[in-house]
């Protein structure tokens, strides 16, 4: 039996182990600031594989003073980043496999059929926050490496596996790994792409808009200006801006996506008393950046939109809308169509599925921005999770796809890094 | 010098004492749950006046099980109600003087020129949360009683002074006082009326509306339903309902009021992550009830409005809007035009100001609802504060008006309770 067939057989024979590993990972709610226990499970697995492990806490001036550091987390202690290296014999290309361990909050418990951290399996699917985004993808990486190591295959190039924190809050974990020196000739990030290829990575960043009103007693509400109603004017303007920005895009990969670079309104809060007219509403959200757009140009478009409100609407002349960019920022990125990494992945995809991969633009930012912009590493985003389930209630993953992704990735590693037959 | 002239002279001679008392009261931020220290100042004043003092904590089944008890406060301990009685010699009508000690939160600090609890005096005005709503009115009551007591006037009827908690949250303090037995032949509540007479008391109650969306990753926001945008649909419907309800009113006292029974949106909150589509938005507010409208009829109008949304809008058929009435409720009330209390107050107003009082409908609910509906006490709302400044930043009061209100109230007490010349 040839090596590729052995890889396939090994992966399908060990599918259940991958499922059990994923379940353990999902049952550790690794929300921001609580990533340590899930990282310990990953470290244990890497130890079993005999890899060189580097486990470190994100601190130090070189990270915080980096011009691309955009993070509102004050304390990283106790929740480390992890890198594990499988050293090649030399003469091959290196590959970086990057997964994030942090998950977003579970949202409204009532919207979940099962407990959000149950990891329950039903009809070939596992349910729970993080199954799709992206512990399932991380398990694909670990399975691929396990197959190669277990079959005793010696690679020429290095394989660097990373399990990072902070992706959901802007990627400080991956930035820290780049600054620590982890770079390679190519990278794969198995974010939930429905097994599609996402060579275009949308950038994104967080904004906070403060809308002012004028307080008054609710009984004489006409004497005040309700900040909630003013916020509705701002939201309408943002929706128009989103339409305008998306109409201006003309890349063919965007044609099938309803809103290629969305502006998401994620949080609203205002007022402190039912009987008072609220004087402030705060909106927080996520601003999509086109792969070929600069962060500055994207920011300018919001500035223009909100500044115009200030000049057109009478109340906003008295109390101008205020805005800031805070916390997370994912840099946009792009892998060229004819890049060797794209070609190898495509070949291996075809050999696994017997059909061409679907290529789309990513609807979200990923840590790929830091890898490509700061690390100068070509990046492909390709993973087993369900794009639409990320951040949703009842998040789940089709378990078989984890094995299929592992299969494509393992074959890609063999080809990319090269096998040392000696 | 006759008694009325002595009262006037005494009040203007002692104006500064009233100002100092108000300043001390304003400097105690008696927000909900922190009323004790301000109550202690009132108690000290009542002791100086030699009144019979009753200071008690709101507890016990008779209060909590009363059908009109609408309150979300779990713990009343440590923050008492206060009643002080000036016993008459008999044969006169009794009067109840009711003020609330609680104040609403200060809102956004940046909107205040001075610290909200400074009690600073500038140009004949005192600034601070509670100056207008309604510690200034309470000082008018205390000044009126002080004048009568200091001048050695013996009344026939009893004067019952109350300083209650919880008015801003629906009036559990006044309900408790009624249930404790404090009733009278008439009552005055010196809420901020700009020295106008408010014989019609708007009722009001608090509502909480839960608007559901469907969560999704912000990058694929089109796969979700943003609860913030759904909330905007609900807010539009509420605005239409408000217009409809106010157009249906035809009492002449409402003609000059822009929105006689407003529906105020006081709080909004939703979402927990900038990059996620929020699945829930909660709106809280205050629903105005016309003086001649039943609570049930007012509630039905909101029920109809929101139920209609559920049938007309597709998404609301999947996730219906939910609503509840919670916490505060102020019963509506009405003092007849030719009631003796109205007549005495009008006579005394004319003798102080040499002009007819302006009579308007109250833009808010007051504790008068509990006094009239549960206690069967005829109530007039008349006080020195500035209606438009209640609950606003930079709340203030014109100090001279405190004395003027005290003057009208003192003369009314003399006439209503009767003087015992023996």
Image (cartoon, coloured by chain):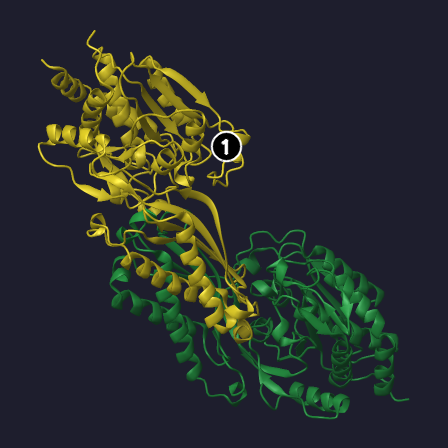
Chain colours: A green, B yellow
Residue A1 vs residue B223: left or right? right
Against A231, residue A360 (above or below) is below
x, y percent for residue A146: 82, 73
| Vertical position of residue B4 compared to residue B204: above or below | above
The residue under the point 42% across, 35% down is: B166
Which quadrant of the figure has residue A301? bottom left
Evaluate whether residue A207 shows in this view.
Answer: no
Q: Which residue is mark 1?
A: B63
Q: Secondary structure at mark 1?
A: helix
Could you say where residue A269 lies in the image, as x and y percent from the top left? 45, 55
Q: Is residue A15 left or right of residue A225?
A: right
The image shows a total of numbered marks equal to 1
Of A401 and A113, the residue lying toward us: A113
- Residue A341: image quadrant is bottom right
**Callout 1: chain:** B
Q: Which quarter of the figure is the N terminus of chain B placed in?
A: top left
Q: Position of residue A409 (x, y in %)?
A: 74, 80
Q: Is B152 placed above or below A381 here?
A: above
**Between A125 and B355, which is closer to the camera in this rendering?**
B355
Percent from the top left, x then y, of residue A199? Answer: 60, 83
């Amino acid at each position: 039996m040839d090596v590729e067939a052995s890889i396939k057989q090994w992966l399908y024979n060990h599918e259940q182990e991958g499922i059990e590993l994923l379940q353990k990972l999902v049952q550790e709610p690794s929300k921001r600031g609580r990533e340590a226990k899930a990282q310990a499970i990953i470290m244990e697995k890497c130890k079993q594989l005999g890899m060189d492990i580097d486990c470190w806490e994100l601190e130090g001036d070189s990270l915080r003073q980096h011009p691309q550091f955009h993070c509102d987390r004050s304390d990283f202690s106790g929740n480390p980043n992890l890198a594990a290296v499988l050293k090649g014999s030399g003469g091959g290309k290196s590959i970086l496999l990057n997964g994030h361990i942090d998950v977003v909050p579970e949202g409204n418990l009532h919207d979940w059929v099962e407990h959000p951290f149950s990891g329950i399996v039903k009809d070939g699917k596992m349910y729970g926050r993080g199954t799709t985004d992206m512990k399932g993808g991380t398990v694909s990486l670990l399975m691929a490496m396990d197959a190669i190591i277990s079959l005793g295959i010696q690679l020429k190039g290095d394989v660097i596996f990373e399990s990072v924190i902070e992706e959901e809050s802007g990627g400080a974990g991956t930035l820290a790994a780049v600054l620590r020196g982890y770079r390679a000739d190519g990278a794969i990030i198995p974010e939930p792409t429905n097994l599609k290829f996402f060579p275009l990575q949308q950038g994104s960043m967080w904004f906070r808009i403060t809308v002012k009103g004028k307080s008054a007693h609710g009984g004489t509400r006409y004497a005040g200006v309700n900040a909630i109603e003013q916020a509705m004017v701002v939201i309408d303007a943002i929706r128009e801006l989103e339409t305008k920005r998306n109409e201006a895009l003309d890349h063919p990969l965007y044609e099938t996506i309803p809103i290629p670079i969305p502006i998401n309104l994620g949080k609203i809060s205002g007022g402190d008393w039912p009987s008072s007219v609220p004087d402030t509403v705060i909106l927080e959200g996520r601003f999509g950046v086109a792969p070929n757009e600069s962060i500055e140009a994207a920011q300018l478009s919001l500035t223009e939109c909100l500044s115009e409100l200030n000049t057109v609407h009478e109340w906003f002349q008295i109390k101008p809308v205020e805005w800031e960019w805070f916390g997370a920022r994912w840099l946009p990125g792009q892998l060229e169509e004819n890049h060797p990494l794209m070609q190898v992945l495509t070949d291996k995809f075809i050999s696994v599925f017997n059909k061409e991969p679907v290529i789309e633009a990513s609807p979200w930012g990923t840590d790929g921005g830091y890898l490509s912009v700061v690390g100068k590493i070509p990046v492909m985003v390709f993973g087993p999770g369900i794009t639409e389930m990320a951040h949703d209630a009842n998040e789940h993953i089709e378990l078989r796809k984890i094995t299929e992704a592992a299969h494509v990735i393992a074959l890609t590693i063999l080809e990319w890094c090269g096998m040392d037959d000696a």
